[in-house]
Amino acid sequence: MKKLTLKATFLSPFSTKRADGTTNTGFIYSLTGTPEALAAYRKMREDKGSQVREDDNGNPTWVTSFDKGDVATLHFKRDMTGVYVDNTQEQRMISTLNQYSSNALLADKLATLVAQELMAKHRPTPHHQVASVVQPVNQEQPEPNDETMGDL
């Protein structure tokens, strides 16, 4: 059987209040792919008894509690009962970092590079902005300077 994939493109964030008063933030993605992959996704959702929601263009949507960047690739589980994000690149970067963990200086530099690479796909864009769940602290914070910014 041919491996089916879907392209997930970020649409918008959402927030819901839980019964305990905490806020749950999620992310909505629009799905595109081959007619076969889109049909498989719709069937999977319907088999689970879940409504298939669509974006304004009629594409099915996927909701996750984790930000997967502006674009992600989704793969179907072997049994076709769910989808998962292809995070091969992230796994490879972390594996490389782990390989050199015994060399503190190299591990530190690699960790910085890995963090920069991982965060690059999560940089806020105008459509990515969400009301902050974290409330500002009423403390004066020192202005950043060369000494407090370190090697950033």
Image (cartoon, rainbow, N blue to C red):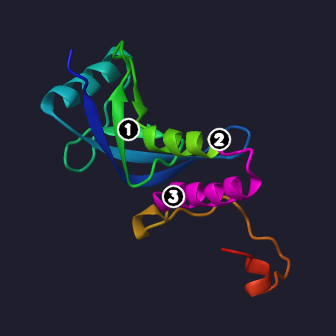
Q: Is residue 119 magenta?
A: yes
For marks 1 and 3, the one nearer the N-term is 1
Q: Which residues are magenta?
A: 100-121
Secondary structure beneath dot 2 equals: helix
Kindly indicate whether the residue at mark 2 contacts the one at mark 1 (C-beta within 8 angstroms). Answer: no
Is residue 92 or residue 18 the one in the foreground?
A: 92
Residue 76 shows up from this direction: yes
Above or below: residue 118 compared with residue 29: below
Secondary structure beneath dot 3 equals: helix
Residue linked to disc 2 = 98
Quadrant in which the N terminus is drawn: top left
Which quadrant of the figure has residue 151?
A: bottom right
For marks 3 and 2, the one nearer the N-term is 2
Q: Residue 117, labelled with which disc?
A: 3
Indicate the amino acid at tag 2. Asn
Label 1 to label 3: alpha-carbon separation: 24 Å
Residue linked to disc 1 = 62
